Amino acid sequence: MAFTGKATYSAGGQLPELAEDLSDLIQIVSPYETPLLDAIGDSMREATSTHHEWLEDVLLPNKDVFTNLDGQVAENWFGVENPNSFRKGDQIQPEDSEELMLVTDISDRAIGVVRCYAGTKPGIIAIGQVVAILGNAGLEGGDNPTKRFTKRKRRSNFMHKFTAKVEVCNNDLQASQLGLADEMDYQKQERVREMLRSLEASIINGELSDEKRRMKGIWQILDTNIFRAGGNSFPPGNVLNEDKVNHVLKHLWENSSGNVDLIIVGGYQKRVMNKFLIAKARADDAEANLYHSDYGICKIITCRWVPQDAVLFLDSSRINVLPLAGNSFYFKPIAKSGDYEAGEVMGVYTLELKNEEMHAVIRDLAKGE
């Protein structure tokens, strides 16, 4: 029997053609979800310039580190990284020590102290040891203290324009379509999905450029807390484990007021994390993907745009994705020169990542398939 293209089963080619069994629903195969954007949520405000700026500030430091004085070590004289962090009369305490000290003198490289202040026991002092600045006490009837303050820093990012053209011939606009009511609306929705996908990818991996005003992404902004597997100050090995996660969370807790509530990973590192997440998961955590650390509860998000060797730790309260005023995703009809309708879907957005030192990243982890 010659091939006819008809679904006639075994009854022969003389039977009438069977109707197509076509579901009236169009399924999208390509990945377009935006888990990080969903976690951050909509911004409560808009940007008002193509070069968006914001201010950041810090408090005066309350700890420092002992350093080497090139052999000029005395019983009551210690090198420190930042002598300007101290004032005469400060009580200080070395890490893991019961000993209190009283600062009596300050130079451009070191501080002079009274050891074993208030009858405390002497401790072992080592280079690289952290010393906490407990505080000062004003003298009754004394002069006003010397003013101290921090300088606010101005941060910025460019707005990034996302755009796509939509064009549908009039025949398609008038004809009945399977799976949709309006071809033009469907094409608009598809282009917006694509641009949302590009927005999420740019938020994570974008690189600053003023040629076409591309915004800087998270990777380009983070600079302070970059932990690399195999580093001297990091738990050994290049396989992600709970010790590494807690090391980062502990560091952020000790050195900032940030509240890390998002851990962003790619597919492979999520599977690695599952090994210790499942072992300690609570009954209600199976779908929420929550990690209950000693430093807070973190939601774990699997994102396609995070490199497979990396883990991101973010404080969502300090992240905003802002549209330029009047330029959140919208459709604008444009001129046509033929038998079709045309328009442009566009949106202008930027990333505002405040206080980059309150976020962190692990890199160089072992990768798999």
Image (cartoon, rainbow, N blue to C red):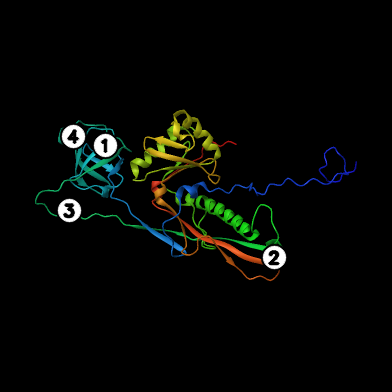
Rendered view: 63 above or below 45: above
Q: Is residue 106 visible?
A: yes
Q: Quadrant of residue 69?
A: top left
- Residue 170 is tagged as 2
Label located before the other in sequence (1 or 2)? 1
Q: Earlier in the sequence, mark 3 or mark 1?
A: 1
Which residue in the structure is indicated by mark 3?
Answer: 145
Q: Residues within 10 Å of mark 1 (few under 14, many from 20)?
A: many
Q: What amino acid is found at the position of numbered circle 4 in the picture? A: Cys
Name the amino acid type tagged 3: Pro
- Tell whether label 2 touches label 1 (CB within 8 Å): no
Q: How many marks?
A: 4
Question: Which residue lies under the disc numbered 1?
Answer: 94
Q: Nearer the viewer, residue 301 or 247?
A: 301
Identify the secondary structure beneath mark 1.
strand
Q: Sequence order check: which comes first, mark 4 or mark 1?
A: 1
Residue drawn at 62 percent across, 57 percent down: 186
The label on residue 116 is 4
Marks 1 and 2 sit apart, C-alpha to C-alpha, by 78 Å
Q: Quick one: label 3 or label 4, which is nearer the N terminus? A: 4
Q: Quote the CA–CA distance across marks 3 and 4.
A: 25 Å
Marks 3 and 4 close (CB-CB < 8 Å): no
Nearer-N-terminus badge (4/2): 4
Q: Amino acid at mark 2?
A: Asn
State the SS at label 4.
loop
Cα distance, mark 3 to mark 1?
25 Å
The N terminus: image quadrant: top right
Q: Residue at x 66, y 70 (%)?
A: 336
